[in-house]
Amino acid sequence: MSFISSTSSSSSSDFSNNVEFDRLVDDYAANHLPHILIPQHSSQESQLNNEITNVPEPKMDREREKGHVQLYNDYFASNAVYNDNQFRRRFRMRRSLFCRIMNKVVEGDQFFQQRQNAAGKLGLSPLQKCTAAIRMLAYGVAPDVVDEYLRIGQTTSRNALQHFCQGVISQFESEYLRKPTDEDLRRILHQNELRGFPGMIGSIDCMHWEWKNCPTAWKAQYAGRSKTVTLILEAVAGQDLWIWHAFFGMPGSCNDLNVLYRSPVFDDVLQGRAPPINFWVNGHQYELAYYLADGIYPKWLTFIQGITHPQVQKDKLFADQQAAVRKDVERAFGVLQARFAILR
């Protein structure tokens, strides 16, 4: 190669001048290595590039009206593109239920009400904001994933999710997010009596929810036997998937007993506020309701556990029935995970 031969035949004094050496290197690179040349910018050019990079992004016209029309025609028009089954699979609920929740949330929060800006252009519709919140809840996606379809920005999507959750709590807390009333208890007791468990008011269990963004300083406290960082949810659920007791936030290093000792599930009983319950089993009268639980729970009168190693047919039948009915709370956990991926 010409560069190597030139340097080998030249003495060290020939390159005492750095300018001459640089010229030879530049000539060789220009002739033999054009594909790896990197242009060198001056300090003024570099400063100009930095200034261009730091320029804020210009305001974008997302054509919000176009996003609303597209969403309405796809899912909410009388002759919508997608049918009821596709709507339920993608929104994790029926169309009628979604519209009911949306109307209630919009009624109680001005954030969802469509308004005009100073230029007279309409903003995002309640349909777009509520759909963005539902998609984030159902799929656990980033706030800007729905931008291309709904024409809604990242910040607005995040705000919509927060306002939507707060609106659901404020609008439906008195109806759904509460303890059972006397009428509810009578209905629950009647349902469970027909299933072979008179006096049973629900199934209790705990579930670990993985905490993906747990701070590093807390990981040892919230990691259990599986070394996974989790938070524990204790819940009581019935056959209709109504979770009327939820105690959430205990570290994953605890077990079901640690959670039970800190849980308010028996506060009403201890303070004498629990409604009286009377039922008969095998000719004996009882005045204390109970829960179906697994083997880790203590041997209290308020817990009915299965038989670990049934020997006779009677014990086997009871163990099978107890395990089948106790799956109510397990099924409730499964529905939560399936419908709301954001919890994962």
Image (cartoon, grey):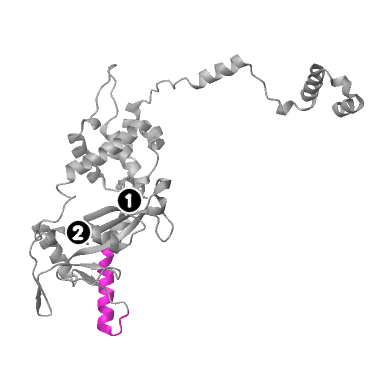
Q: Is residue 147 left or right of residue 200?
A: right
Residue named by callout 1: 339
Image quadrant assignment for residue 238? bottom left
Asked if residue 318 lies in the magenta stretch, the reply is yes
Mark 2 touching mark 1, by CB under 8 A?
A: no
**Can you name the residue that lies furthest to the right here?**
9
| Label 2 SS | loop
Tag on residue 270? none
For badge 2, the amino acid type reads Val
Whole-percent x, y for residue 136 in the image: 35, 42
Q: Is the magenta stretch mostly helix, strand or loop?
A: helix
Residue at 85% x, 21% y is 15
Q: How many marks?
A: 2
Density class for disc 1 (Cα within 10 Å; few <14, some 14-19, many ≥20) is: some
Asked if residue 340 lies in the magenta stretch, the reply is no
In magenta, the rendered stretch is: 309-328
Whole-percent x, y for residue 292 in the image: 23, 68
343 up-or-down from 188: above or below: above
Residue at 74% x, 25% y is 34
Tag on residue 265? 2
Density class for disc 2 (Cα within 10 Å; few <14, some 14-19, many ≥20) is: some
Quarter of the image that includes the N terminus: top right
For badge 1, the amino acid type reads Arg
- In-front residue for pair 249/219: 219
Whole-percent x, y for residue 219 in the image: 41, 51
Measure how far apart labels 2 and 1 are at the Cα level.
26 Å
Residue 72 appears in view: no
109 up-or-down from 84: above or below: above
Residue at 14% x, 56% y is 180
- In-front residue for pair 212/223: 223
| Label 1 SS | helix
Whole-percent x, y for residue 65 in the image: 32, 27
